[in-house]
Structures are given as structure tokens and as C-alpha cells.
Amino acid sequence: MVADAGSLPGVLHADLLTEGLAVRDGFLSPPRVLGLHECAARRRVRGDFSPARVGAESRLQTRREIRGDSTCWLAEPLFAEERALLDDLERLRLEFNREGYLGLFDLELHYARYPSGAGYARHLDQPLGRDQRRVSVILYLNPEWPAAAGGELRVFDGAQGHRDIEPIGGRLVCFLTAGREHEVLPARRDRLSVSGWFRSRER
């Protein structure tokens, strides 16, 4: 039986705090992955997704050659499956604070859907001059994802090159946001995730 979020206490913080990057398969069971996939499909039908933009504040713009996904921010009213995910991630936030004293205060979260051929060029998650985003979080919602489909998350490390992480359904990736460059490689089929950041209070 695939482990679900509730049965994985204490297994993410150690890698996050020592390596700056943690990857755990089976964070959500296949039925829950499918449930969130269906939530995203319903939101697409009703027009909740919009093209992602790059830049900050007044300089936000759509640049498909840099970032080709569409996003939908998770906000009320939520589907039951989405609320359950937020509960899981709230427990994770408390664990990170308890074990690593990270001062994480809240979470911003969105669906990210990449159509076939789309990617996201190498970038940082912290806007220039703002450091509230402390831990980046990505949960993949791609059932039965074959290696040949591509779409890996490439996480860069100045000392060791990079690590490629396949977007397998139920897999959770967390990394310390500050200074961590990463990109999304183009996939050969549609690619879906829930992505966001645990944030600290504004200083």
C-alpha cells in the first residue's frame, strides 16, 4: 500500500535542513492524486486558469518563451480534496517549524499546468528584494508518468551541478527557496502540479 501524507511524519525535515532539498514519493496516495487532478480539470472548465506571468508587480508580463504554464491560485471556496491537501501541508509547516525553527507563517499555493512542449526557464522563486518565501513546495499530480515523457524539475547546485526530478504523481519536493535556481524541462505530454511556498512574516 502506498504511504499517504498522514503516515510520513518526520521524514522530510531532515533532508531539507541538511541538504536544502527533500523528495518524498507517495506523499499522497493515487486516489488522492486523481481527486486533485479532477479538481484542476473542473477549475479549467469554469475558466479559473490563466497564463502565468513573469516579473514583479507593475512589470508582470506573459512570456511564453520563458514560462509556458497556466496557473490557478488556491483560494476559497475550495473543493474537499483541496482542503484535505491544505491540512496535510499545514502539518508539514508545523513540523518544519518544530524541527528547524524556520519561522514559517503561512502558505501560498497554486495549480500549475504545462501543456506539451512548455517549460519554465532557469529562475529563482524569491522576488528581488523580498525574502518571505522560505520553502518551495511542489506536489505532482501526474498518474503513471513515464520517464520518456520528460518534464523534469532541474534543481541547480553550484557545487554539484544539478539534479533532475521526474514529476511522478504523489511525489512531493521541498527545497529552501533562497538562492536555489531551478527550471522545468519541457514535457511530451500535459504536466500538472500544485506548487507554492511556505512563507515567513514580512519584515
Image (cartoon, rainbow, N blue to C red):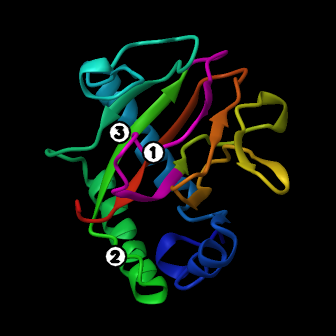
Magenta-highlighted residues: 115-138
**Of discs 1 and 2, which sits in the foreground?**
2
Quarter of the rendering occupied by the N terminus: bottom right
Q: Residue at x 49, y 28 (%)?
A: 113
**Left or right of residue 87, residue 144 in this image:** right
Q: Secondary structure at mark 1?
A: strand
Q: Residue at x 32, y 20 (%)?
A: 60
Q: Residue at x 57, y 55 (%)?
A: 30
**Left or right of residue 172, residue 95 in this image:** left
**Of discs 3 and 1, which sits in the foreground?**
1
Q: Which residue is mark 1?
A: 194
**Left or right of residue 102, residue 77 in this image:** left
Q: Give neighbour class at mark 1: few <14, some 14-19, many 20+ (Cα, 10 Å).
A: many
Labels 2 and 3 touching (C-beta < 8 A): no
121 within the magenta span: yes
Tell me the kind of residue under disc 3: Cys
